[in-house]
């Protein structure tokens, strides 16, 4: 089993969703994971950002509130842009 793949269950529908973690970042003293949905049709794959919450030995993933989604996605985009614009080390 691939350690980078997790299965989440949608509490409302009971649907299982497989996600591959591709990145993580910190913002305002919170940690977020960037995940790619794994589907049979690669064209339907989506990038999803979830908050990572450590509670003792447990790690929980929490969806973002609608009110904060844009700010979190924009912040991650700015991190990616900054990394892309960095000069390669020689």
Image (tube, rainbow, N blue to C red):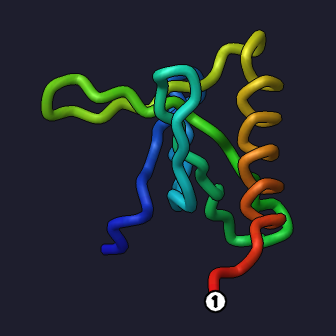
Q: Nearer the viewer, residue 61 or 54?
A: 54
Counting from the top left corner in percent of width and height, residue 46 is at 76, 54
- The residue furthest front is 90
Q: Position of residue 3 (x, y in %)?
A: 33, 67
From this viewpoint, which residue is outermost toward the bottom?
90
Is residue 44 rendered to the left or right of residue 37?
right
Residue at (29, 29) in percent of width and height = 54
In the image, residue 18 above or below residue 77:
below
Residue 12 location, x and y as percent? 57, 21
Q: Is residue 12 above or below residue 37?
A: above
Query: Where is residue 67, by image quadrant?
Result: top right
Query: Where does the image place residue 1, in percent across and percent down from the top left?
Result: 31, 74
- SS for dot 1: loop
How many numbered marks appear? 1
**Mark 1 neighbour density, 10 Å: few (under 14) some (14–19) many (20 or more):** few
Q: Residue furthest top?
A: 67
Please identify the quarter of the rendering in which residue 5 is found.
bottom left
Residue at the image position 41 percent from the left and 65 percent from the top? 4
Residue 12 vs 23, above or below: the answer is above
**To which residue does mark 1 refer?**
90
55, above or below 77, in the image: above
Judging depth in this view, the residue of 24 and 36 nearest the camera is: 24
The quadrant of the picture occupied by the C terminus is bottom right
Residue at x-position 29% and y-position 35%: 59
Q: Is residue 28 left or right of residue 66?
A: left
Residue shown at 54% from the left, 43% from the top: 25
């Amino acid at each position: 089993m691939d350690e980078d793949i997790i299965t989440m269950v949608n509490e409302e529908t009971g649907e299982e969703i497989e996600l591959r973690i591709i990145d993580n970042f910190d913002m305002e003293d919170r940690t977020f994971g960037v995940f790619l949905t794994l589907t049979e049709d690669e064209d339907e794959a989506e990038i999803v950002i979830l908050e990572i919450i450590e509670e003792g030995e447990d790690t929980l993933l929490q969806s973002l509130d609608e009110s904060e989604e844009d700010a979190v996605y924009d912040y991650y985009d700015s991190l990616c842009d900054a990394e892309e614009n960095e000069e390669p080390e020689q």
